[in-house]
């Protein structure tokens, strides 16, 4: 098989790394990829942006790829999979209509309400007056969410009425999130511990991956601004077998059934961001793709060949597909550039990459990196995802940090407490 992986972050490096290890895969193209992808055997980066739907379709046809694996949400929401389908190219990911599950939070919440999927109580608003009226007459705290895609920045947790009103004015009056914020969802703030549950689905059958947990805040102890994710680990003990069964029957099955009933069957990778609290698992959000950095912690634990499983998703028939997981936990620590999650400087040389990757039970996935001559330099906010495997979660974290500590670039930001919840639970 010749595959095309769309995207250029840590998730896509992990995908290319895993897929290149399949005996059935001859070549992995990656658009645009990064310096880490370019260094994988069988892999080749092509300079086509992951938002350039026309360019990606042309590339898939010109290279006669057998399967396209789409990493990020934007091309899915823009209809890349529909366009590839029209040209007979199989792809992993939902079509445009089904991708609204991530592309519109109002669509997702309305589906959840219809299907009885546990989630925070919510209202949808387009007019500022109505939204302000809701905040004035409801108890709070509130979560104000831009309806559309906002690169993870469109969710504001508001503990006071003032904060909520300000958030609404920014979105509905000042257009701070552009089109994405012209409609907002206001929902109740849920308490508990978050976890990620990701499943492959052919539109009917569901194959859940191992559980994982992301760390969205920049600083240790879950303080500071939200980021794309500063680390992850798998499995997440908070999602025990009983919770996972509940998530399968009360979240995944009704979501997949509901989308099929709405005339947009979901074929691809479905991600439920969950809050596990006193009311049991509640859905915070759906994504229509693999998580980043969850994927970097998941794929090193996957023993099965991923390529045939993804092909089965694209063909719409998951029957007979099973996935076998390494019982050892994995911990992924993100190394981010100075300034992240704000604007960052690029072009800082990175050293120690080879020494880190040579450590046993370590994988170094690149995110925002580029090659400059014979050096690898920084080229984005999240630069690397460094993964360690270990006999338990503590050993996995120790391994990951040993590898982090041999890698250097100026101004690197690293959280030192990735997996603290799993570690606290053990203590
Ligand atoms: P979302 O993009 O909807 O997942 O929101 C991003 C982050 O905001 C989540 O990972 C949570 O940390 C937080 N969040 C979203 N919705 C809620 C909610 N209803 N209650 C508490 N936290 C939330
Ligand atoms: N890790 C959260 C996300 O991929 O959206």
Image (tube, grey):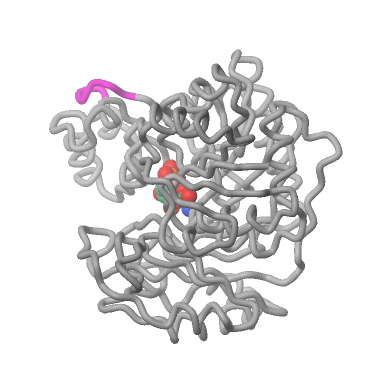
Instruction: Say if the magenta span includes residue 181.
Output: no
- Name, please, the residue furthest toward the right: 320
Which residue: 25% across, 27% down? 179
Q: Residue furthest left?
A: 174
Q: What segment is highlighted magenta in the picture? A: 125-130
The foreground one among 89 and 326 is 89
Residue 81: percent from left, percent from top: 53, 27
Residue 328, horizontal then vertical, whole percent: 72, 72
227 relative to 183, above or below: below
Q: In terms of image quadrants, where is residue 369?
A: bottom left
Q: Residue at x 43, y 52 (%)?
A: 33
Q: Going 77% across and 55% down the picture, which residue do you hit?
A: 304
Q: Is residue 140 visible?
A: no
Residue 221 vs residue 135: left or right? Answer: right
At x 41% / y 26%, what residue is drawn? 78
Quadrant of the snapshot with the N terminus = top right
Q: Nearer the viewer, residue 155 or 259?
A: 259
Q: Position of residue 427 (x, y in %)?
A: 63, 82
Is 128 within the magenta? yes
Can the viewer see residue 160 in this picture? yes
Say left or right for 248 vs 139: right
Q: Is residue 245 above or below residue 295?
A: above
């Amino acid at each position: 098989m010749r595959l095309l992986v769309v995207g250029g972050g840590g998730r896509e490096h992990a995908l290319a790394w895993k897929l290149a290890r399949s005996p059935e895969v001859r070549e992995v193209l990656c658009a645009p990829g990064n310096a880490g992808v370019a260094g994988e055997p069988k892999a080749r980066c092509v300079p086509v942006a992951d938002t350039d739907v026309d360019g990606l379709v042309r590339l898939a046809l010109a290279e006669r790829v057998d399967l396209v694996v789409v990493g990020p949400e934007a091309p899915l929401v823009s209809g890349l999979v529909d366009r590839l389908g029209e040209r007979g190219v199989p792809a992993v990911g939902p079509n445009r209509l089904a991708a609204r599950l991530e592309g519109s939070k109002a669509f997702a919440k309305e589906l959840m309400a219809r299907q009885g999927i546990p989630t925070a109580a919510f209202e949808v608003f387009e007019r500022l007056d109505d939204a302000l009226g809701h905040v004035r007459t409801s108890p709070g705290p509130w979560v104000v969410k831009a309806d559309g895609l906002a690169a993870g920045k469109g969710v504001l947790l508001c503990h006071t009425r003032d904060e909520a009103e300000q958030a609404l004015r920014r979105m509905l009056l000042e257009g701070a999130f552009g089109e994405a914020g012209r409609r907002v969802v206001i929902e109740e703030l849920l308490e508990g511990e978050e976890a990620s549950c990701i499943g492959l689905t052919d539109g009917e059958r569901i194959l859940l991956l191992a559980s994982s947990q992301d760390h969205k805040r920049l600083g240790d102890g879950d303080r500071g601004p939200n980021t794309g994710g500063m680390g992850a680990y798998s499995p997440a003990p908070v999602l025990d077998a009983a919770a996972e069964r509940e998530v399968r029957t009360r979240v995944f099955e009704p979501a997949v059934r509901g989308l099929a009933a709405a005339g947009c069957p979901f074929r691809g990778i479905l991600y439920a961001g969950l809050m596990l609290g006193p009311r049991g698992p509640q859905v915070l959000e759906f994504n229509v793709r693999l998580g980043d950095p969850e994927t970097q912690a998941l794929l090193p634990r996957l023993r099965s060949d991923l390529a045939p499983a993804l092909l089965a998703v694209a063909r719409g028939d998951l029957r007979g597909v099973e996935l076998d997981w390494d019982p050892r936990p994995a911990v992924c620590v993100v190394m981010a550039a100075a300034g992240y999650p704000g604007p960052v400087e690029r072009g800082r040389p990175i050293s120690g990459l080879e020494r880190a990757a040579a450590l046993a039970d370590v994988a170094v996935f690149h995110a925002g990196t580029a090659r400059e001559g014979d050096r690898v330099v920084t080229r984005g906010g999240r630069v690397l995802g460094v993964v360690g495997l270990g006999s338990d979660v503590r050993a996995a974290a120790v391994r990951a940090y040993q590898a982090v500590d041999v890698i250097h670039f100026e101004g690197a930001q690293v959280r030192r407490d990735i997996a603290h919840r799993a570690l606290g639970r053990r203590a």
